[in-house]
Each structure stands twice: as C-alpha cells, then as structure tokens.
Amino acid sequence: MSVVPADVLIDRESDSYLVQKCLKGDRQSFSELYRRYEHKVRSTLYQLCGPSSLDDLVQEVFLKAWKGLPKFRQASSFSTWLYRIAWNVAADHRRSQAVQRSGLQHLTDTGTPHAPAPDLMQMHYQDLVQRGLERLSFEHRSVMVLQDLEDLPQKQVAEILGLPVGTVKSRLFHARAALRQFLQLEGVEL
Amino acid sequence: MTEQPIDDQPLVTFLRQHRPAPPLPAPDLEERILAAVANEPAHKSQYRHRRLWLVPPAIAAGVLIATAGHRLLTPPSPNRAEIANLEAFFVNSWDGTFSDSSAADTAFEPFPSDSSQSE
C-alpha cells in the first residue's frame, strides 16, 4: 500500500477549499495560498513595475487579497482574482511613480552598440527583453506579460484586465509588433 | 496582395527564454506578510460585526411598523353626536326586534302536530 506524502495531500486541496477555510479564519490556509502564488505574483509585478519596492508590492497584493476574501464571489478562479489584484497594485504603483518622476528625464543607455561576449549573451538578452517591455505602454505591457510571459490563456487575461477578448488580441498584436521591431533593431533575429 | 501572417512563436519563445528573473524576496517576507495578515481581524469576527450592524436598523424598522400599524388599525374614537346616534340605533333595533316578533312568528307555517298526522 502506497503512502501519500502529506505535502502532496495539501497540494491536492483546491484553491476554493482553501479560500473557504480562510473565510472561517484559518490563516494557515492563506499561508498555503501564498506559497502557491507568491512566485507568479512576484514575477508579474516585476515585469510590470521593475525591481524597486517589489517586496512591498507583493505584500500589498497578499494583504489586499486577505482583506478582500469575503467579497470574493468565486465567479472567477482564485488565480484570476489574485492576478487582477496584482495588476491593480502594479497600475497604482506606476501611477504614483509617474507623479514622482514628472519633470525628470528617464536615462537609459541605448546609444552605443556593444558586442557582448558569449557568456554574457543571456544577460544581454535579458536586458533587451526588459528594455523592450519598458518601452511598451502599460496596457500593451500588461497583456504581453500575462499572456506571453505568464502563459495565461487569452480568456483569463481578458478577465483579469476586465477587457473584451478582442481588445486583448488587438493589444497583443500591437505589443508584439513593437517588441519585435525593437529587438530586430538591436540585432536579434527572430 | 495579402500580407503573410507573422509567426509569433519565435518571439514568444525568445521572451520566455530571456525573461528577466525577479530578485529573490527578503528572507522574512513570508513572515512579514503573515504577521500583517494576523494583525487584521479574522473574517469570522467580521461577519459577526456585520450581523451586529443589522440589529439597530431592524429594531428601528420594527418600532416604526408597530407604530404605523397601531395608528392605522385602531379606529378613531367617536364624538358625542356619533355616540348619541349609535345609542339611538341600538334602541330602535331592540324596539324593532320586540315589536316585529309576532310578524316574524307568522312568517313561518307551524308544523302540523303529531295528532293530526296520526289521524
């Protein structure tokens, strides 16, 4: 007779079951939800906002999630709802950053073309992707991060952003075109 | 001339391969978040508070309904003239009852007696 490890049993508990337990005041279940989604939330926030205040933003997302659980109607999945909170936090953060930065020039080193050594190629490409994403508008960037980087289905992206699927498709088309053009200008062959 | 559809797969693959990785979280981030959550009121007690908020409006609504119902359902007290009319009506009704009793008796045919049946 095979013995199922305890952690596997915990993983089998559905999100909605854990949410129900959270609503009964079980903070341990929220800890489990945190461990399940921390990486995805962190990655999304990083792609949308960059490294500054990342820990604070992650904390804000999960605290808002805990406070908002009684209002979560479970019409959508927990992950969609959590991504939506993350996106709202990112949008708020960007707005406040934009206010702080107003009047200042954003300096980026795009002038001199450089030929990186092969062992630095990965870092160079990561830098290109980051710079390419930064050049996109927040709306286009959000669609691209959620669908192309987080690998979420288009329908879920539409739910998270509160947009029709057609709008998501359109934004994705333009975002990909802009990013492709940027990468090609930087010498990347796609 | 129709444009050839662009294959997005190489771009998507490139992005996924070279997506910048987020920096590692602070070692105590999870503890911080769970401590912040612990400082929030538990959802159960929130429900209880929400129910308690319903009590005063419910009492106020009950009092209002009772008062309005009492006013609507209680008949107004009659004035002297109405009381006098009512007394006169009662007296007439009683008089009519006694005076019409013979007529009322004759309104029905008496049953034949047992003796007449046996005849």
Image (spheres, coloured by chain):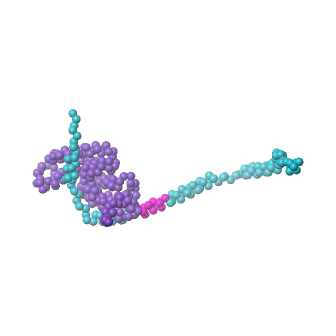
On the picture, is B82 further left or further right than A25?
A: right
Nearer to the camera, B20 or B61: B20
> Is residue A142 at least partly visible in the picture?
no
Q: Residue at x 28, y 44 (%)?
A: A169
Main secondary structure found in the magenta portion: helix
Q: What residue lies at 21% left-to-right and 33% top-to-bottom?
A: B1
Residue A144 falls inside the magenta stretch: no
- Taking the spot 28% from the left edge, 48% from the top edge, the residue there is A143
User: Per the image, is B47 magenta?
Assistant: yes
Residue A92 percent location from the top left of the image: 31, 53
Considering depth in this image, is A99 or A69 the residue closer to the camera?
A69
Question: How many numbered circles are shown?
Answer: 0
Q: Position of residue A45 (x, y in %)?
A: 27, 55
Q: Nearer the viewer, residue A181 or B66?
A: A181
Pick the quarter of the image with the N terminus of chain A. Answer: bottom left
Q: Residue furthest front?
A: A1
In this rendering, position of residue B91 left or right of residue A111: right
Q: Which chain is cyan?
A: B
Q: Is residue B70 visible?
A: yes
Looking at the image, residue A189 sits to the left or right of residue A92; the answer is left
Q: Tell whether A168 sits left or right of A189.
A: right
Give, as a single range, the part of the protein colored magenta.
B43-54
Give the chain coloured purple: A
The spot of residue A108 in percent (x, y) is 18, 51
